[in-house]
C-alpha cells in the first residue's frame, strides 16, 4: 500500500507543479500583452486606428478573442483584431436588420416571381393612371404629365454605361401599392439570405417588354432619386429602351430647395424630413442591409421589400417637395420650367459625348511643353534660385531637424571623449604596471588611435555643420513653395481667407488667390497655368505622359453632368472613368 500511496502523492504534486507553471505562463503572457498594448497605444494612430485599437484592447482582455499570430505583438495585429470585431458586429447588425425587414413586409408590397403575374401588374398600372386622370386632373399639368409614379432600378453595379438592371420597382400612389419585378438575380456562394438555385423570378425579356411602353410614354410622369448620375435613365438605355416623362428628380429638387443639406441621399433626406410626410422610425440604407455590393445575389423577397420602400419613400419625398415648392416664391416655376427637363437632357448629352480634335490637341501639347520649360527657367532666374538659395531654404525648412542633429552631435562627441579618456586611463594603467611589451598594450594603443580619429572626424555641433537634406528646388513640393512665398518673398499669409484651419498653405485655391493679388508671383502663376492646361486637359485627352486617356472606345469624350455641382450652384462636369482601361484595350483590339 505504501508504494502506491507514494506514487499518488508524486503524481498529484507533478500535476500541481504543471498547473502552477501554466498559471505563471498565463500571467506572464497577460503581462506581456498589457505591455504590448501600452507600447502600441503610445504610437501615433489615426482616429480610425485609435478606435480599432480600443476595441481590440477591450475585446482581448475580456477574453472574447485571442491572438491572430505568434511572436511579438505589433500594430498590424492589434488593428486587425479591432477590424474583425467591428466586421463581426456589423454583420450581426445587418442580419438583425434583414430579419426585421423580412418580418415587417406590408400587405400592399408585391414581389412578382411568375411571368403569369405580369398582365395583372400592367393592368394595375393602367388603373392607377386612369384613377389619377380622374382624381388628380391637371395636378401635374405644369410638368407636362397626366399622371405620376415613383420608380427605381436595381442593377448589377454603379457603372451607368455598362451595367444592366436586375429588377424594377414602382409605387402606385392612389392604389397605395408597391411592386418589385426581379429578373436578374444570380446565385453566388457564401451569401447569407442569398438567391438560390431554383428560386423563382421573372424572365428579363418579358419584363422589359411589359414595362418599356409605360416607361417610354412621355406624358406618364415619373420621379426618380437620381441626381448627377441619372442612373436609371442610363440603365434603361443599356437594357434597350428609353425612359421618357422623367419630369422630377427628388435629389435635384432638394438642391433647389436647400443647397446646404448635409447629405442628399434618399435615406438621409427621408430620415430628416420624414415626419413631414408620414415616414417615421429608422430608415435603412442599402449598405445597412447588403453592404458594399450589388443586390443581384440576394433573395428577391428581401431586395423587393427594400426596393419598394425606396420608391415609397421617393414618392412621399416628391409629394412633399411638390407641395412645398408651390408655396415658396418661384421655386416651383423654376423647377418646372428648367430643372424638370434636365435628367433626360443630361443623359442625352452624356451618351452623345464630345468629338475631340486630337490632332489639334497634340499640336497644343507640342506648343506648350517648351513654353512650360521656359516658364520654369524664368522662375529660377527671377527668384535667383541657386545653391545659396537652396542652402538657406534647407536651413529654414529643416530647422527642427538641425537642432536635433546639434543635440545628438553633442552627445556623440561626449561619448567619444569618454571612450578616449577610458582608453587613455587603461593605457596609463598598463604603463604603470610595466606591461608595455604585451600584446594588450599594442591593441589598446591602436584602439585609442582609432577613437581619437573618430573624435577628430566629428564635426563641431553648429548649424553650418549640420547635413544638408534639400539639394534642389521643386515646384511641386509644398514646403519649397511655402519657403519661396512666405519666407523668401515675404508675402503675408492669407490662408485664413480660404481655409481658417490652416496656415502658410500652398493648396491650389490659396495659390490662385495669391496669383491674382501678388504681381511678384507672376512667374509661378505662368508655370501653374501651363501645368493645368497640360495635366488637366491635354495629356488626359491624349493619354500622354503619365496620364491615362479619358477618351472612350467610341472615340469620344463622355462626361457626367451634375446640376448644382458647384458651390455657386452652377453645373459641374467630370469625365466618365469607371471602365477599367484594360477592358477598353481589349474592346478596341489594342
Image (tube, grey):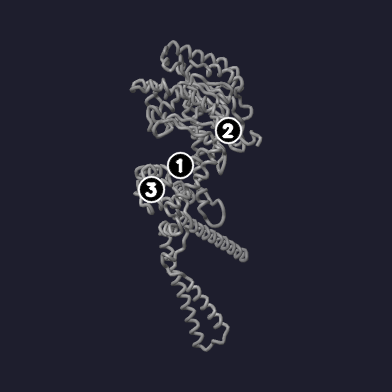
Q: Which quadrant holds residue 157?
A: top right
Q: Is residue 333 above or below residue 457?
A: above
Q: Relative to the observer, which residue lies in front, 349 or 151? A: 349
**Disc 2 marks which residue?**
552
Residue 470, image x, y percentages: 47, 57
Cα separation between marks 1 and 3: 16 Å
Residue behind mark 1: 529
> Which is nearer the N-term, disc 2 or disc 3?
3
- Determine whether 248 is above or below 368 in the image: above
Residue 520 badge: 3
Helix or strand or loop: what does disc 2 sit on?
A: loop
Q: Left or right of 295: which side holds 54?
A: left
Labelled pair 1, 3 in contact (Cβ < 8 Å): no
Residue 304 percent across, percent down from the top left: 53, 26
Query: Mark 2 near mark 3, Cβ–Cβ under 8 Å?
Result: no
The residue that appears at 64% across and 35% down in the rendered structure is 586
| Crowd rating for badge 1 (residues with CA inside 10 Å; few <14, some 14–19, many 20+) | few
SS of the residue at dot 1?
Answer: helix
Q: Could you tell me which residue is drawn at 59 percent across and 30 percent down? A: 554
Q: Residue at x 55, y 62 (%)?
A: 17
Mark sitting earlier along the chain (1/3):
3
From mark 1 to mark 2, how far is it between C-alphas? 27 Å
User: Percent from the top left, x then y, of residue 99?
Assistant: 51, 32
Helix, strand or loop for disc 3: helix
Amino acid at each position: 500500500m505504501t508504494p502506491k500511496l507514494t506514487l499518488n502523492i508524486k503524481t498529484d504534486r507533478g500535476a500541481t507543479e504543471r498547473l502552477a507553471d501554466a498559471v505563471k505562463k498565463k500571467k506572464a503572457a497577460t503581462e506581456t500583452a498589457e505591455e504590448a498594448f501600452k507600447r502600441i497605444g503610445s504610437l501615433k494612430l489615426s482616429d480610425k486606428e485609435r478606435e480599432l485599437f480600443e476595441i481590440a484592447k477591450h475585446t482581448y482582455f475580456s477574453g472574447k478573442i485571442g491572438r491572430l499570430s505568434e511572436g511579438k505583438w505589433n500594430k498590424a495585429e492589434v488593428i486587425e483584431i479591432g477590424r474583425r470585431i467591428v466586421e463581426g458586429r456589423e454583420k450581426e447588425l445587418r442580419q438583425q436588420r434583414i430579419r426585421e425587414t423580412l418580418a415587417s413586409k406590408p400587405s400592399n408590397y408585391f414581389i412578382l416571381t411568375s411571368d403569369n403575374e405580369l398582365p395583372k401588374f400592367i393592368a394595375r398600372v393602367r388603373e392607377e393612371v386612369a384613377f389619377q386622370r380622374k382624381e388628380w386632373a391637371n395636378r401635374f399639368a405644369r410638368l407636362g404629365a397626366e399622371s405620376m409614379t415613383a420608380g427605381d432600378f436595381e442593377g448589377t453595379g454603379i457603372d451607368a454605361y455598362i451595367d444592366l438592371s436586375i429588377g424594377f420597382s414602382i409605387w402606385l400612389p392612389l392604389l397605395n401599392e408597391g411592386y418589385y419585378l426581379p429578373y436578374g438575380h444570380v446565385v453566388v456562394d457564401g451569401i447569407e439570405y442569398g438567391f438560390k438555385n431554383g428560386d423563382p423570378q421573372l424572365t428579363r425579356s418579358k419584363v422589359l417588354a411589359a414595362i418599356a411602353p409605360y416607361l417610354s410614354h412621355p406624358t406618364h410622369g415619373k420621379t426618380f432619386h437620381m441626381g448627377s448620375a441619372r442612373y436609371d435613365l442610363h440603365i434603361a438605355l443599356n437594357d434597350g429602351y428609353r425612359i421618357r416623362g422623367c419630369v422630377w428628380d427628388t435629389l435635384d429638387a432638394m438642391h433647389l430647395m436647400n443647397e446646404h443639406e448635409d447629405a442628399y441621399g434618399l435615406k438621409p433626406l427621408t430620415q430628416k424630413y420624414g415626419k413631414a410626410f408620414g415616414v417615421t422610425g429608422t430608415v435603412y440604407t442599402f449598405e445597412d442591409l447588403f453592404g458594399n455590393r450589388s443586390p443581384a445575389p440576394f433573395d428577391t423577397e428581401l431586395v423587393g421589400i427594400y426596393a419598394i420602400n425606396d420608391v415609397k419613400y421617393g414618392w412621399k419625398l416628391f409629394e412633399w417637395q411638390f407641395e412645398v415648392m408651390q408655396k415658396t416664391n418661384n421655386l416651383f416655376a423654376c423647377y418646372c420650367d428648367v430643372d424638370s427637363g434636365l435628367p433626360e437632357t443630361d443623359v442625352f448629352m452624356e451618351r452623345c459625348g464630345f468629338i475631340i480634335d486630337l490632332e489639334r490637341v497634340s499640336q497644343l501639347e507640342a506648343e506648350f511643353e517648351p513654353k512650360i520649360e521656359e516658364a520654369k527657367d524664368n522662375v529660377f532666374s527671377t527668384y535667383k534660385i541657386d545653391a545659396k538659395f537652396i542652402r538657406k531654404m534647407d536651413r529654414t525648412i529643416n530647422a527642427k531637424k538641425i537642432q536635433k542633429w546639434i543635440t545628438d552631435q553633442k552627445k556623440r562627441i561626449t561619448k567619444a571623449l569618454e571612450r578616449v579618456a577610458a582608453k587613455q586611463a587603461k593605457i596609463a594603467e598598463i604603463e604603470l604596471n610595466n606591461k608595455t611589451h604585451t600584446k594588450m598594450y599594442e591593441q589598446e594603443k591602436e584602439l585609442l588611435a582609432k577613437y581619437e580619429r573618430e573624435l577628430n572626424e566629428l564635426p563641431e555641433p553648429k548649424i553650418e555643420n549640420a547635413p544638408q537634406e534639400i539639394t534642389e528646388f521643386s515646384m511641386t513640393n509644398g514646403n519649397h513653395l511655402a519657403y519661396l512665398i512666405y519666407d523668401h518673398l515675404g508675402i503675408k499669409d492669407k490662408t485664413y481667407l480660404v481655409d481658417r484651419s490652416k496656415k502658410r498653405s500652398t493648396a491650389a485655391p490659396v495659390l490662385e488667390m495669391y496669383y491674382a493679388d501678388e504681381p511678384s508671383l507672376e512667374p509661378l502663376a505662368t508655370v501653374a497655368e501651363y501645368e493645368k492646361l497640360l495635366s488637366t486637359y491635354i495629356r488626359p485627352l491624349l493619354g500622354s505622359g503619365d496620364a491615362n486617356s479619358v477618351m472612350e472606345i467610341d472615340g469620344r469624350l463622355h462626361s457626367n453632368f451634375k446640376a448644382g455641382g458647384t458651390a455657386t450652384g452652377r453645373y459641374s462636369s467630370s469625365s466618365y472613368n469607371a471602365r477599367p482601361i484594360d477592358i477598353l484595350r481589349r474592346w478596341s483590339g489594342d
